[in-house]
Image (cartoon, coloured by chain):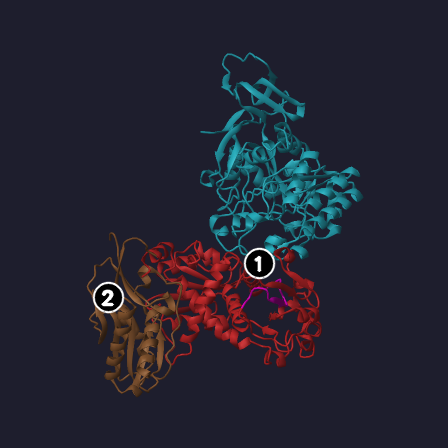
Amino acid sequence: MTSSGSMDTIMDAHAFARALERMAGEIGALADPADLVLVGIQRRGVELADRLASLISKSGTEIPRGALDITLYRDDLETIGPKPFVGETNIPCNLDSKSVVIVDDVLYTGRTVRAALNELADFGRPSKVSLCVLIDRGGRELPIQADIVGERISVGKNDRVDVLVRELDGKDGVELVAEGEG
Amino acid sequence: MSERSTIFTGGRVIDPSQELDTASDLLVVDGKVAEIGKNLTAPDEAEVIDVSGLIVAPGLIDVHVHFREPGMEEAETVATGARAAVAGGFTGVCVMPNTDPVTDNQAAVGFIVKQGGDANAARVYPIAAITLQQLGERLSEFGELVAAGAVAVSDDGRPVVSSHMMRTALEYAQTFGIPIVDHCEDPSLAAGGVMHEGLVSSRLGLKGIPSAAEEIMVARDALLAELTEGRVHICHVSTEGSVEIIRQAKSRGARITAEATPHHFTLTDMACEQYDTNTKMNPPLREDHDVAAVIEGLKDGTLDVIATDHAPHHYEAKERDFDDAPFGVVGLETALGVGISELVDTKQLSLYDLIHCMSTKPARIFDLPGGGLSGGSPADLVVFDPTRLWIVDEAKFLSKSRNTPFSGRELSGAVVRTVVAGMTVFEAD
Amino acid sequence: MTALELGKDLLGLESLTAQQIVLILDTAEPFKEVSERAIKKVPTLRGKTIVNLFFEVSTRTRISFEFAEKRLSADTVNVSSQGSAVQKGENLVDTARNLEAMRIDMVVIRHPSSGAAKFLADRIDSNVINAGDGKHEHPTQALLDLLTIRDKRGRIEGLRVCICGDILHSRVARSNIWGLLKLGAEVAVCGPRSLMPLGIEQLGVRVISRIEEAIEWADVLNILRLQLERMTGGFIPSLREYNRVFGVTVKRLEQARHDLLILHPGPINRGVEIDSAVADGSHSVILDQVTNGIAVRMAVLYLLSGGRRETAEAAMGLNV
């Protein structure tokens, strides 16, 4: 892990909570809550999906949520070799005719989402698939866009955007770590 | 040939046959040793060879080699084997009869003698088969074989299974004064085995050959030698138990002699760890305590001679999985270096004792010319540098085969020149 | 070699560290889920070519590998000694050269000679997975045994595991012994002394001569198949006597802990080394082993794919 470079706060805990609440509202408006399924991408996407589902559930309907580990669907095995740790994939129900929302922390090249779409297709045929991300940092390499975005930022190629969640990192927030050099 | 003289000056002459270890010149006249002494005056036309700092010794004699001709000429021929021999400092070798066809008749023995003569390198002495086709069923005709040039009989490669047959051979051979040379192995215990049976074979999942497979037959042969008063020579002793059995038999006066190979006094079954088929030989590499016992046997004379069991195999034959590869390793071109490195440099044997085991004693046991440099004996000798370091590179072997377990090993002691009947037959670059 | 790297080949468990073994077991866990899906396939090894080279008859192991390969989307070719010119003792070298020329990515090899997998691995650039070499090792079988025990018990460390039967001729026993010892289990073997390899105690394994004693001692019994040839080979008098003396029977299990696990690598000789009622009974986890076999093999294929040193090093630098 990198420790060099300067660090800026993009979202504090307060801004983080507000963003999630707004996003939950937008998701609720996407489809009939009875048809909604939230699927988070391992790892922080899973936590975010859980939070969003709880927020939407406050309005009455329990939203099914799942987890997707896209490691086995990556297209870079040949170049960077296998990642040694493969996470859990858990799809809670049949996805046929559901409105599935993929949740991830940061949208960057779009390759992760491409892999997630492929993987999702192996679990059924949803009537609609949407994408919800906390941060869109630009830099797309594939024609993929998010439907719901917490915040759009523009950062350099060598910068890193870290989304922190209480459950894993002890606090909520988003930080920008600027690398000294490329 | 007209009178030809060569004088070797400035060397250290070691000749156990005369209990000699002295800084001397050595004069060879007409293929025979003429004189050993300080500051000899050579005839005017004599070739002068300066051997300062080097050892001059009777040519080494290997009583156990396989030259594969006839039948497996892609691995070795008598000619290539005899050249490999002189490159290793050997001036005489005894070739085993397990060729195809087997050396079990007069014509076959004559063929080896002729090929050996044509090779113009080391002297080649045939050992003939004890039984026809080495089948262990009928004795071969020892009288005719000896008349044709055989110096001993052996079914090497296979043991003589029947104790009755062994007894008969030991008795019958006495008429001709030749030793019975036995490869000691109980075939039912050894069946299917490819390495020493022990912890390493258990780990590697390879079928083991227990030490007892050898020791049972050594014990039998020792008892039969006593019973018959015949002469038995035990090949390639590999276990502590065998050494002890031979020691006891000798102390009781049995006419038993025995040999040890360089690989058995150097390597253990740990060498097989990587499934390298160049560590597969029969008898197999044993354990540390066996290596120590074999060295002890050489030190106290229980084991009389060092013999290589030079067993060449073509590259393709060894390039297989361990179970399917043939047994055997080459040894002629590394024996002196391994002997000096593993026995002399480690202070286990003196250089004098090593030459005793590699030249004088083998000549005496097999009743061969050579093995000494007394006046009038054939000028078969080796000149070597006991301290020169070299790395075993099998690509440089004169043998046709490369199957050495010592590849890449640094050895001390290098052959400089080998002379047979006064003629230089090998000279190092 | 770091814990993140298995190297080019999987030849045995003797040469692996505890960390590497745990990595394979941990990686196998998520692969179990893939086999539970309606579409039992992920694209991970798409475009990779794998040859299953079987010089010895095998149904279970070959099928298990084939499922694992197909569920990872690899292209597979099966070569077996019955259907082609390959025979024991014949042209393992030529086979290696041919495979190399065909630019395949991985070879799964089963061969009757110990060391054959290493022989091949030393001669080709492709990854080699040992699916059983002679009496040497059968690493994926031991890994699936370890995974099954860990699943059922939550740990390996401190468990008492007894391997029963023909240890002398068993590659399953050897791989299990290494894996179990490295992960901290207490290991024993039980069977007739004529079927025990020399010096087995020196590996840190306890030898138990009576099956009754083994049953009382163990948390886990791994019961090996007794090959019919062992009788004709003179190692035991008869299968009947073997069952009488060493068979794991319902009656003998009365002395076992209630949560004793019984494993068997298959195929089972019912009524010889194990009673039918035991094989199908409450202690048995034999079918879990079969299920876990696919997950473990998927994990091994995955971890070795692109597992060459340079790519693994690059992966560590690039992990985002």
The front one of C120 and A121 is: A121
Query: What amino acid does circle 1 point to?
Result: Gly
Question: Which color was chain C given?
Answer: red
Q: Can you say whether B141 is above or below C178 in the image?
A: above
Q: Tell whether position C160 is magenta.
A: yes
Residue C116 visible in this rendered orientation of the protein: yes
Numbered mark located on residue B205 in the image:
1
The front one of C9 and B146 is: C9
Q: Can you say whether B191 is above or below C250 in the image?
A: above
Q: Which chain is brown?
A: A
Which residue is pictured at 69% across the width and 79% down the height? Answer: C251
Residue C134 visible in this rendered orientation of the protein: no
- Which-is-in-front pick, marks 1 and 2? 2
- Which of the chains bears the disc numbered 1? B
* For residue C92, side relative to residue B298 (left or right): left
Q: CA distance from mark 1 to mark 2?
A: 52 Å
Which image quadrant is residue C297 in?
bottom left
State the predominant SS element of the stretch in magenta: loop
Q: Position of residue A17 (x, y in %)?
A: 29, 73
* Residue identified by numbered label 2: A109
Q: Position of residue B107 (x, y in %)?
A: 60, 43
Q: Secondary structure at mark 2?
A: loop
* For residue B176, side relative to residue C32 (left or right): right
Which residue is pictured at 71% across the width and 74% down the height? Answer: C244
Q: Tell whether position B30 is magenta.
A: no
The magenta segment is C155-169
Query: What amino acid does circle 2 point to?
Result: Thr
Q: Position of residue A102 (x, y in %)?
A: 29, 76
Q: Which chain is cyan?
A: B
Which residue is pictured at 67% across the width and 66% down the height? Answer: C191
